[in-house]
Image (tube, grey):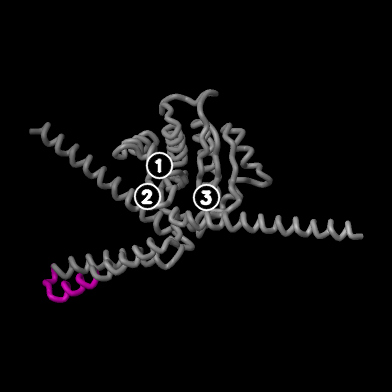
């Protein structure tokens, strides 16, 4: 009898832990949504409007039910309406436009960081694995919280969010790199190890601190990690994010991510205002690049024509 009670207690404990983990992951996903820029895709906007209509309909039904019920039922419906209103607010915020500021999630650990990785659909599939086995393994080995943005039709990239103490987050990126490169998870990198280019997303307000004065912080991190770092100049569409490229073997990326985290922790007040990149706006970036290239080619042609005109005038003289 005592043995059975112990088994029941252990089973209940496991269930509570699983439910707590699921609740934390859902909160992480919701936090990301609130900080992510609005989608400029008309199909996505229409979907959000339909979601709003559904939420309003549910709220209206809840109000009607509350009018003709007992006090106990009224209390239940009131709670339900409160949840509907909360959902409506969240949806409206996402629809209205980019969130210009947000509250950094509270965490007891002073080394807590939240890093985001931009990766291709194929890489994401490798990281998640069949039935989510691989991403679960990464979470277990690193003790970091890892979740993936939704898969959008026609968008070739997704964002992977990694949260936790800086060492756990850094370790997670080392494991992610090994998964992508199909390397053993428990073997140290060597001279023969393959290299990978990890793309992290950071608001431009903190990128300057990561780079350092005249690139001093970059050089320091590169010397300590043996990875090479490069920050893209362009800000991603409808966001404040820039891409930080970390190139190296898995262990080098692990170490570089850790040192970058220390800089982010030191200047985390500059992370309080950010608009996260939304992969749904990928096409906006493609259009901007095409426009930039056409402008450059057009200016080149004008310069060429100008030089020809000067040459012709000179020859006539």
Q: Mark 1 points at which residue?
A: 124
Q: In this view, does 78 lie above or below 229?
A: below
Q: Is mark 1 on a helix, strand or loop?
A: helix
Q: How far apart are marks 1 and 2 (CA)?
A: 10 Å
Q: Which mark is residue 202?
A: 3
Q: Distance between the residues labelled 3 and 2?
A: 21 Å
Main SS of the magenta part reads: helix
Task: Please say if the residues under marks 1 and 2 sit with CB atoms less than 8 Å apart.
Answer: yes
Residue 213 is one of the magenta-drawn residues: no
Q: Residue 151 carries which label?
A: 2
Which one is in front in this view, the residue at disc 3 or the one at disc 2?
A: 2
Which stretch did the figure color magenta? 59-72
Q: In this view, does 259 lie above or below 156?
A: above
Q: Residue 148 vs residue 203: left or right?
A: left
Q: Is mark 2 on a helix, strand or loop?
A: loop
Specify the quadrant of the image occupied by residue 141. Answer: top left
Which one is in front in this view, the residue at disc 1 or the one at disc 3?
A: 1
Q: Which residue is drawn at 58% across and 50% down?
A: 207
Nearer to the camera, 170 or 44: 44
Earlier along the polypeptide chain: callout 3 or callout 2?
A: 2
Earlier along the polypeptide chain: callout 1 or callout 3?
A: 1
How many marks the image carries: the answer is 3
Residue 62 is one of the magenta-drawn residues: yes
Q: Which residue is drawn at 39% across and 50% down?
A: 149
Dot 1 surroundings within 10 Å: few (below 14), some, or many (20 or more)?
Answer: many
């Amino acid at each position: 009898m005592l043995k059975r009670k112990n088994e029941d207690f252990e089973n209940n404990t496991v269930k509570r832990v699983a439910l707590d983990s699921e609740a934390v992951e859902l909160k992480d996903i919701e936090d990301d949504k609130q900080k992510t820029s609005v989608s400029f895709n008309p199909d996505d906007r229409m979907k959000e409007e339909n979601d709003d209509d559904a939420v309003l309909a549910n709220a209206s039904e809840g109000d009607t039910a509350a009018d003709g019920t007992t006090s106990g039922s009224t209390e239940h419906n009131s709670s339900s309406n409160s949840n509907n209103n909360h959902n409506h607010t969240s949806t409206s915020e996402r629809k209205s436009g980019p969130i210009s500021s947000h509250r950094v999630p509270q965490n007891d650990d002073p080394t807590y960081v939240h890093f985001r990785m931009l990766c291709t659909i194929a890489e994401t599939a490798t990281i998640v694995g069949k039935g989510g086995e691989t991403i679960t393994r990464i979470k277990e080995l690193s003790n970091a919280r890892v979740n993936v943005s939704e898969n959008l039709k026609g968008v070739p990239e997704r964002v992977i969010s990694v949260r936790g103490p800086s060492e756990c987050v850094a370790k997670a990126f080392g494991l992610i790199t090994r998964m992508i490169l199909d390397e053993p998870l428990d073997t140290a990198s060597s001279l023969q190890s393959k290299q990978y280019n990890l793309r992290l997303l950071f608001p431009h307000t903190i990128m300057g601190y990561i780079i350092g004065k005249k690139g001093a912080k970059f050089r320091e991190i590169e010397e300590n990690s043996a990875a090479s770092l490069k920050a893209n100049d362009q800000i991603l569409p409808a966001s404040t994010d820039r891409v930080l490229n970390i190139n190296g073997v898995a262990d080098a990326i692990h170490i570089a991510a850790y040192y970058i985290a220390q800089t982010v922790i030191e200047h985390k007040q500059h992370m309080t205002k950010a608009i996260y990149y939304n992969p749904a706006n990928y096409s906006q970036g493609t259009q901007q690049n095409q426009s930039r290239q056409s402008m450059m080619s057009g200016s080149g042609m004008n310069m060429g024509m100008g030089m020809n005109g000067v040459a012709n005038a000179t020859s006539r003289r």
